[in-house]
Amino acid sequence: MPTYTPKASEIERDWLIVDADGLVLGRLATEVARILRGKHKPTYTPHIDTGDHVVIINADKVVLTSDKAEKKKVFRHSGFPGGIKEQTFGDLLAKKPEEAVLRSIRGMLPHNRLGRAQLKKLKVYAGPSHPHAAQQPQVLELPQARRRSA
């Protein structure tokens, strides 16, 4: 029996919305990356983009555990000698929460053209409003991503 490989015309993509209010960033990122890759579907194929679209709202209310906000560093480079910039993750989360969530999810996707195509299906917004109401996104609950009380 030959292995089934879905064709591009057979792939059905859903729209999902995630409210990131109070969710731990790493746990949110792993679940969203899994959905963007399509690993939750029985038709998952590693070399084909079979994932769904994901809209994340309230990215500014995401939580970091431990003291990662002060100790975890984020780097960017201008391309010129000595052009490296360093910033704590807490500062990035305060100034550009969309970028902080996007960076976390991007690191969990493949680092090739397939990963770039999968990342295009992710939309991140700092506040509760988004312009994707016409796609009728279904709410995706992530109870395992909530912060556990010790």
Image (tube, grey):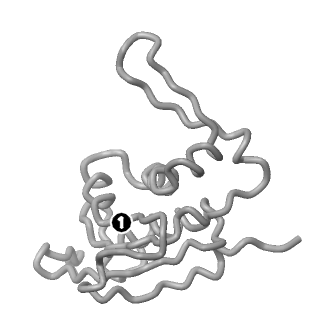
- Residue visible at 41% across and 76% down in the picture: 129
Q: Quadrant of residue 141?
A: bottom right
Residue 49 in the image: state x and y as whole percent. 26, 66
Image quarter in which the N terminus is found: bottom left
Q: Residue at x 52, y 32 (%)?
A: 75
On the rendered structure, is 2 left or right of 86?
A: left
Dot 1 alpha-carbon crowd within 10 angstroms: few under 14, some 14 to 19, many 20 or more: some
The quarter holding residue 92 reads top right
Q: Secondary structure at mark 1?
A: strand
* In the rendered image, the vertical position of residue 143 relative to residue 100, given as above or below: below
| Residue visible at 72% across and 47% down in the picture | 68
Provide residue 116's location: percent of width, then percent of height: 29, 52
User: Disc 1 residue type?
Assistant: Lys
Given residues 79 and 98, the one toward you in this image is 98
> Which residue in the structure is indicated by mark 1?
123
Please tell me whether residue 87 is drawn above or below residue 1 in the rendered image. Answer: above
Looking at this view, is 148 or 22 the one in front? 22
Q: Position of residue 19 (x, y in %)?
A: 52, 77
Screen quadrant of the C terminus: bottom right
Q: Position of residue 133 (x, y in %)?
A: 30, 84
Is 133 situated left or right of 56 in this image?
left
